[in-house]
Image (cartoon, rainbow, N blue to C red):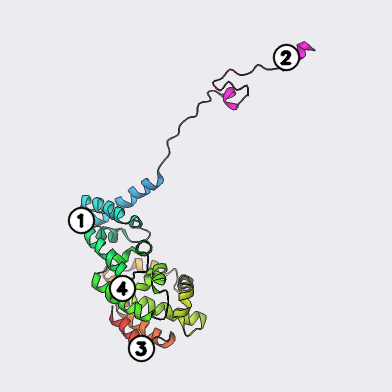
Amino acid sequence: MSTGAAATTAPLPNGDDNDGRYTLGHYYGSTKKVKVPELDHNARRRQRVIAEIVEAGRRLGIKEDVIRTNLDKMEALLPELTPDVNKMRAAEWAKLARDVNQVAMMLVVIKTSYPGANVGKIVSRAPKTLLQSPEQLQADAAVVRKVLAGAPNADAIIEEVPYLMSPPALAQSLSNVSRWYNTKDPVAMISKNPKLLLNVEEADLEADPLYGDAIYVEDELPELQRRALSAAAAAAAPMVAARTAAAAANIPPDVAAAAAASV
């Protein structure tokens, strides 16, 4: 019996741990952990994005060192200004990085125009806003505040849905809310739930029979024809939106006209 017991009893391991327990490390080699270098995916992604912006800036005649330096300054100024080509084209980021002082001034203009809004959230969701002139943004803000005068949280609405800083876009969005929800007071409705607009705009877009096709068709157009098409659409949209809003969203005609004239 003693021989059988001795045969079935294994000696305690004499590894570095010396804790009397067997581990996989005792059977397969060293128990020391192997340090695997971690890849900083965010840093690598940022490098790719900046390289794309630098290339776009080169085509615009903007020096690489200016773009790299100012992108760092912009991000230090406001962390939400981390470059992201999913939010704005690389060429537009390059234009924005051309003058960091202009960016700082525009941040102040946005804050003074919408004092109750979080500027960081606005520019994070709509960085293209910073490419406007201060005069245009202030003029648009005056129209927007007049249209949203009945909302107790106008700044919160703009913070949640920054594209409404454009009077034509605001007029069209209110018209869509009136049409989809059969309401004569779309301002009151969006003041209760600003995110409602995001759902309405997506649904309205998908209901368009050309949804998903127009982008590809436009890519096939020659450059000059595409520019002409964009210019024509931009010229017609404000007046159409203003008339639609005045008729369907119960917006005073003078406000709708001001929205069209502000563009």
Cα separation, mark 4 vs mark 3, equals 27 Å
- Does the magenta run of residues contain 231? no
Q: Which of 238 and 196 is in front in this view?
A: 196
Q: Is residue 237 above or below residue 18?
A: below
Q: Is residue 36 left or right of residue 93?
A: right
Tag 3, which secondary structure? Answer: helix
Amino acid type at image mark 2: Ala
Identify which residue is drawn at 50% across, 26% down.
Answer: 32
* 4 vs 3, front mark: 3
Where are the magenta residues, as a range? 1-27
Residue contact at pointers 4 and 3, CB within 8 angstroms: no
Tag 1, which secondary structure? Answer: loop
Q: Between disc 1 and disc 4, whose residue precedes? A: 1
Amino acid type at image mark 3: Pro
The residue labelled by disc 4 is: 230
Counting from the top left corner in percent of width and height, residue 224 is at 26, 70
Q: Between disc 1 and disc 2, whose residue precedes? A: 2
Counting from the top left corner in percent of width and height, residue 142 is at 30, 78
The residue labelled by disc 1 is: 62
Counting from the top left corner in percent of width and height, residue 94 is at 26, 58
Cα separation, mark 1 vs mark 3, equals 44 Å
